[in-house]
Every structure is written in C-alpha cells, then in structure tokens.
Image (tube, rainbow, N blue to C red):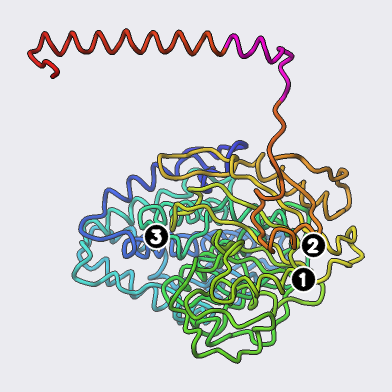
Amino acid sequence: MATIKSDNNSSNNGATLGFEAKLYQAADKLRNNMDAAEYKHVVLGLIFLKYISDSFEEKQDSLLKEFADPNSVYYIKDEAIRSQSTEDKDEYLAENIFYVPKDARWPYLQANAKQSQIGTLIDDAMHTIEQENPRLKGVLPKNYARPGLDKRQLGELVDLIGTIGLGAEEYRSKDVLGRVYEYFLSQFASAEGKRGGQFYTPRCVVQLLVEMLAPYKGRVYDPCCGSGGMFVQSEAFVEAHGGRYDDISIFGQESNPTTRQLALMNLAIRGIEANLGQEHADSFHNDLHPDLKADYILANPPFNSSDWGGDRLREDRRWVYGTPPPGNANFAWVQHFIYHLTPNGTAGFVLANGSMSSNTSNEGEIRKKIIEADLVDCMVALPGQLFYSTQIPVCLWFIAKNKKDLRFRKRTGETLFIDIRKLGVMIDRAHRELTSEDIARIATTYHAWRGDKNTVDYVDVPGFCKSTTLEEIHAQNYILTPGRYVGIEDIEDNGIPFEKQMKQLSAKLHEQIAESERLDTTIKKNLEVLGYRGK
C-alpha cells in the first residue's frame, strides 16, 4: 500500500494519498457495458461498505483488547462471554460507529467474492446494515444481484477495494477511504460530463467558498447539496482551525434521489451528522427546512435552470426583490438564499456569468433591488474550465445580510470585486484547477477587505481586486462583472525608453516577415518538385 503523499500546489481533486488514481483506473477497467452514471453507484456503494466494516472491526479489536486486559475495569475472564460482548450493538452506536452484522462484514464478502451469488450477498449485507442502523434506512444501493451486472467483474471489484487501508495502520480507515471516495466522485463527474456536474462541485471551488465564508460556528445550509462536498469541506475547515465539529450544524436538501444517497454516504463515511430532510425534494416546491435561518449558506445550484416550475410560484413569499422569470431560476436561487439567512448571515454561491449582467425578464430589476438593499458583499469572476458541467466561465456571489456587523469593518455601501480569470492551472486538456496559493490569495484579500482579525490592511490591486461604492455600481447600470471595476493589471516598467523598444520591435518584425517570405518560397519549390504547380 502506498504511503500518504502531500500536495501543496494544487487541490488535485482530493488525490493526496498517492494511490487513488491507480485504484480508479483499475476499477474502471472492470467496467464493461455500463455507463459512469450507473457504475459510480456500484463502486461508491462498495467503498462505503468497506469503510463501515473497517470502522466496526477497528472498534471490535479495541474492545477485545480491553475486555482481555486484566488491568482494565472492563475485564471479562470468560472468553466466550468476552467474544459475545464485542457484538453488543450499543458499544458501537455509542461512539457513532455503524453496527455491521457478521454476514455483512468485508472479510466475509471478500471470502465469497469468487462465488456466483456475490451480488446477492452484497444486497443482503446492505439490507441488514440498514435494519441495524436506522440512520442509513433507504440510503444504501441494493441492486448488485441484477442480471446486467457481471458477477465475475463484481468479485474482482470486491477484491480490488479490499486493498484499501491494508498495510497503513498509522492512518484511520475513515481518512483513507474518505479521500478515495472524494477522488472517485471527481473522476465519475469528469466521465459523466454535464450530468456529472449536477452531483459534484470541483473541490477547489468548494474550498474557495469555504475559506472565504469561514464557517466557524453556527448553522450551515445548502439547499441543492449534490453529493455533500460543501459540508465535508466546512467540517474540514473547522478542524483545520482548531474548532469542534459540534460547533456547526448542517442542513441540506437534494432533489435527485440517487444523488441524495451519495451525499448521505459521503457524510457518513466521515462521521458527519447532517439534516437532509426525510426525503429527496425540490427546494423551490417542497422546502424541507421552511423556517430555517442559516448563519452560512454555501451552494452550487443548477446553472440557468429553465424548467424549475416558476409559473406555479408567482406569489411566493421568498420573492422579496421581484418575481423571478419562469425561464431561468438564477434569481429564484439568490432570493431563496437571502430568505434563509439570519440577520447577520452570509452566503457564498456559484452562478452563471449571465446573472451579473442580464437585463431580460425582470432579472436586471431584481439584481438592482438586491444591490440597492446593500446585500452584495463580494463578486468573484472565475476562470473557465473549472466545472465538469460546463466549459463556460461562472462567478461567485457573496451576500452579507448585515454589513454593519460589528465583528468586521463596516463596509456599508461598498462591494468588493475580484477578478481571477487568469488564475489556476490546467490539469488536463479540459479541466482547470485553482491552486492552494490561488485560494489563499483570494480568501486573504476578502478577509482583509472585511477587516477580519489578524489580517493585513486591504489595498486595491489593478487587474485583481477593487473596493467599489454603490454609486460606482449605479454608474455601470447595476452590472456586477468584476472586469468593469478592477481595471487592467499594472505592467512593470522594464526601464527601456519607448523609442528604443519600438526600434527593437520593428527590427524583429522585419526579420520575421523576411523569414516568412523565405519559407513561402521553399514550400512552393517543394510543391513544384512533387508536381504541384500553382496557377
């Protein structure tokens, strides 16, 4: 088993252990006539099963040692009773560990991986785990016995996933499997393209949102939570800054039932408690948290959704700043977020670039009223190719319900614009990522502007950031595109006089023109030798 590797240059979609890519490639080879949308549930369900089995066995081994230690207050002399005691379900549930019955444990399944009934055994394991752990009811995939799933390949996949965590006792299985799970999510999103983007927000974008909002304590809400990435990174942020998990409460909702399953497994694999409601549901038409007021909202709603059913919600109480057009849900989402914020709450979310400038179908008027209400705290223009669901650039909106909040510098009547379209690195031909340095620079700029504790003084940087007044935004017809405000990056003076530079550039240009003419002549001669003469 490979050892954990660190990566300080890029978020790298969570591939920080050193073996996820190899594991994914090996697993992908087992895929036959099955598309990624279906196959991801096969793989991720098994990864989850491996995680809860490893966690159970780790706790069971700990209990065995404790019960067998004569110096322990829990010492049990009789070996049979000691063995029976390690099957006490309450011992596991008390520590937030899922109880796994014997026939659902990974060693049993792997011992039968070559059997033709392996699919049925896995389905039975999922059923019994849900029965023993009500929190998982309806969460786990249970269709491994279906005829279309090749049982030989399924057995090979069980053997392959069985290698995760072996030989790495110094790492908790939760940490290893959690990162493998995230890496697989990113790879499946890439394989599925546009559909994949509906369940997975790129890790670097989530990290940027979390670092800027800094959800230390309070209620965190995502009404279109996909596979739960916002919640995972929020918990990671709290831990990284010395906080406690129970300092934040997590609320979410997801309309797609299979994606909701992914979210619940993704959270459970890390031991994160969250309230995602009792079922999958559309946040516009069946708000599962109607009275919730959140301290932080992080979200990546579907871009430019045209079939959100706006005609049925014309008089909704959430539309304080105007009725959103039925053909585009962007400003329905914005107003949904604002509605669910506490008086001092902040929201950070992804929207299509059109939301910053569109004046069609009442969108311009809604944006104007939100700006005039002094709710827009910060706008960030993102580079293209960050998302699996679209190659067009998108932006980040940050809403602050109360800019007079005494915890920060009063920024009433001001908005910060940040343009990062030139940042990031290409990780393949189609996808770009923001590096950890990029994220730190952007978040530091925002916190300095807000006047957070332990930050440097904020200064405008041409081409990158600009603190702007409402009057300036009004002069731009309430358009929020950062490029209109940040200006052009300063070009460093190289000390060479202009006249001298022009002579050098002119000489170089004439050299290139002469070389071009020489190459044209050579190409023509070669074509004539081959019998191709021009007219």
Which residue occupies 26% across, 9% down? 521
Q: Percent x, y for residue 469?
A: 81, 58
Residue at the front extreme?
A: 535
Magenta span of residues:
492-504
Disc 2 marks which amino acid?
Leu
Q: Which residue is mark 1?
A: 372
Residue 515 position (above or below residue 307): above
Residue 180 position (above or below residue 9): below
Number of disc labels: 3
Disc 3 marks which amino acid?
Lys
Q: Is 130 or 439 nearer to us in this picture?
A: 439
Is 187 left, or right, of 289 in this rendering? left
**How far apart, in angstroms, are the residues tagged by discs 1 and 2?**
7 Å
The image quadrant of residue 532 is top left
Residue at the left extreme?
A: 531
Q: Quadrant of the N terminus?
A: top left
Is 49 left, or right, of 473 in this rendering? left
Query: Could you say whether the residue bearing mark 3 is in a helix, strand or loop?
Result: loop
Residue contact at pointers 1 and 2, CB within 8 angstroms: yes
Is 471 left, or right, of 197 in this rendering? right
Q: Which residue is mark 3?
A: 194
**How far apart, in angstroms, are the residues tagged by discs 3 and 2?**
36 Å
User: Which badge, 1 or 2, comes first in the chain's sequence?
Assistant: 1
Q: Percent x, y for residue 288?
A: 58, 85
